[in-house]
Amino acid sequence: MSKFSYSEYLSQFRNAGGKCNNVQARLRGDTRRGDCQGDVTLEPDAVNSAMLAIRRGDVDAINDLATSAPQCLLLGNQNEYTPLHEAAFRGQKECLKALLRVHPGSVDKRTLEEDTALLIAVCLEHLSCAQCLLEAGADPDISNKSKETPLYKACEFENVDMVRLILSYGATVNQRCGQGWTALHQAVSWGNIEICEILIRAGAVINPSNTYSLTPLMVAAQRGQMEAVRYLVKKGADVNIPTCEGVTVLHEASKHGHRETVALLLTKNADANKATVSRLLPLHIAAERGHHKIVSMLVPVTSRARLRDSGISPLHLAAEHNRHTVAAVLLKTGADVNTKLAHSQAIQYADRRATALYFAIAKGNTKTAEVLLRAGASLTLDPIHPLLMAVRQGCLTTVSLLLERGADLNARIPSYNTTFPAVIALCMYNLNLLKSLLAFGCDALSCFSCTYGSAPHQGSNGYDFQNGYMFPLSCCESKERATQFCEWISTPVMCKWAGPIIDLLLKHVGQVQLCSKLLELLDSQEEWIAIKRKALSPCPLMQLCRIRILTQLGRHRLKSLKSLPLPYRLIQYLKVPQ
C-alpha cells in the first residue's frame, strides 16, 4: 500500500471542497475499502477500542484504557497513525487532553509521513484541538515530508485565527516548505491581505524567493491577486527583483494576462526594459501569449533599442503563435512588418527564416499571415520563399493569399535542385493544391522536358524517398545535379500517384512528348492506360487556344481575367481546364 500524507491530501481537495470517505482508512493503513467509519481489523483490540472511543468522543472509555492498558494508547498502525492523531483528526479536544495526560511526551509523535497531531488538527481546522496541543507543548515548527509547517497549512486554508494562534506560540514565520515557499508566499497566493499583515507584523521577510526564485510579489502577480500586489508594494516589495532566469514581476503579470496588475506595476516604476536571460522583455511575453491590451500598454514604455538587442521582435512571436490581434496592435503602433530576425536567432533554423510572415506561414497561422500581408509584408526577405513553406504546409488559403500578392511560383529550394517547379514536388499528395498552383500559372510544361527522351534513363540523382522523405527546406546548397520530374515521380514513395498527377499536368500543356520513364509508369497500372492514350493523341484545339490565351495574359492572368470584358462562360473556360 502506498504511503499517504493527510495534509497533502487536504491540499489537493482544498478548492474543490472535496470529501473522502477513505482518508481515515488510508492514514491508518486499513486494507479494506469503504467508509472510514468502519471497524479497524489490522490493529490490536485495545488500540481498536481506543480509536472507536475517540470517534464517539467517549472520554470515559479513554480514561479506562489509560488505567488498564496505557501502552496501547501509544501504538500506531503500519503508518504510525496513533490514537492521538485520530483525536486531532476527529476534533475530539477532551479525548486529546485525556491522551496527553497519560502520555504528555507523545505530543509531537509523527506518522510515517511525518504528520504531527498539530498539523492534522490545523488541516482539519480544529482550532480548539490545535490550542490544546500547543498548550501541551507541541512544537509549531515541525513539518511534514513536504516541509510544510502548521503555520504554512493554516495560511493555505486561510484560517486567520489559526495563524494568530500558531504565531502566538512562537512559530518561525519565515520557515520554508520543500518548494522554498514561506507562509507569506502561501497567503499571497490566495490574496489574503489580513493574513499577510499578521505575518509581516510577526517578522515575515517581504522579498523571500522560493526554489524558482519567485518572491511573494511575483506569486501575487502570477495569480492576478491585485490587492495583494498593491499591499506588498506598499510594504516595500521590490518590483524589479529578477529570478535566476531574469524574470520580473512585470514579466509574470504580462504572461498571465493580468492587465490591471500590469497597469499598477507600471505606476510603481516597474522596469519594462528588463530582459530575461533569453533576452525577452515583458512586451515579448505579452505578445507571445496574445494579451493585446497589455501589449498596447507596454509598447510606449519599451525601448526600441532593447527590442533590437533581443534579436527577435514581438511581431515574430505574435506571428509564430497566431496572435493576429496582437500583430494588428503592434503594426498599428509602428512595428515594422518587415523587421528581420537577428542572425544569432536565424541560424537556429535550417531554413534561416527571417520575417514574421515566414514564422506565421511555418506554423500554419493563416489569419496572422493575412494581417501581415495586408500591412505590406515582403515576400523576398527570407532565404527560402514563403510560398514554398506554405505549399509544404498544404494550406490552400495561405498559398492563394501569397499568389494573389505575386509570389514566385518558380522559387527554388536551395537544398534540392529540380528542373521543374519546386512547388510541384512540395505538393506531394495534395492534388487540390496542385490544381490551384497550375491555375495560377505554375510551369507544367517543364515537367515533360526530359533530357533522356525516349532513350533509357541513367539511374537517379541519389535522393532516396523510400520512407516518405520530405524535401528539406534548408539553405544548404545541393551539390547534386538537378532532378527531373520523371525521376521524382518514379521514386517508390511517389510512383503510385503518377497517373493522377500526370493527368492533371496534361490539362495545362499543349502537345508534349512523354519520355520512356513516364510511359513506363503509366503502363504499370491498367487504369492509367487511358491517360497514356490521351498523352499520345493530338491535343484538342480548345485546350491549345486556352493555353495560348493564358500565356499571352502572363503571370497575373487570374487577376487580369476579372477585368476583361468577356462573357461569363468564356471566363470559366479560361479558368478551368476541360
Image (cartoon, helix red, strand yellow):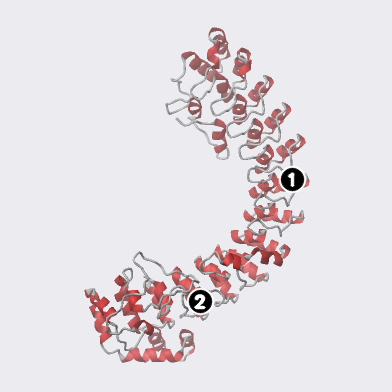
Relative horizontal placement of residue 534, taking residue 479 as reference (left or right)? left
Choose top left, top right, bottom left or bottom right for residue 63.
Answer: top right
Relative horizontal placement of residue 234, taking residue 224 as reference (left or right)? right
Q: Secondary structure at mark 1?
A: helix
Return the mark for residue 136: none
Q: Position of residue 476 (x, y in %)?
A: 49, 71
Return the mark for residue 232: 1
Mark 1 nearby-residue class (10 Å; few <14, some 14–19, many ≥20): many
Q: Quadrant of the C terminus?
A: bottom left
Image point (36%, 74%), residue name: 461
Between discs 2 and 1, the one toward the N terminus: 1
Looking at the rendered structure, the kind of residue marked 2 is: Leu
Q: Which residue in the protein does label 2 denote?
A: 402
Can the viewer see residue 566? Answer: no
Q: Quadrant of the N terminus?
A: top left
Do the CB atoms of the residues marked 2 and 1 lie less than 8 Å apart?
A: no
Looking at the rendered structure, the kind of residue marked 1 is: Leu
Q: Nearer the viewer, residue 507 or 37?
A: 507
Q: Nearer the viewer, residue 487 or 49?
A: 487
Find the distance from the CA under tag 2 to the CA under tag 1: 51 Å
Q: Position of residue 83 (x, y in %)?
A: 55, 19
Relative horizontal placement of residue 141, taking residue 485 as reference (left or right)? right
Q: Position of residue 137 (x, y in %)?
A: 68, 20
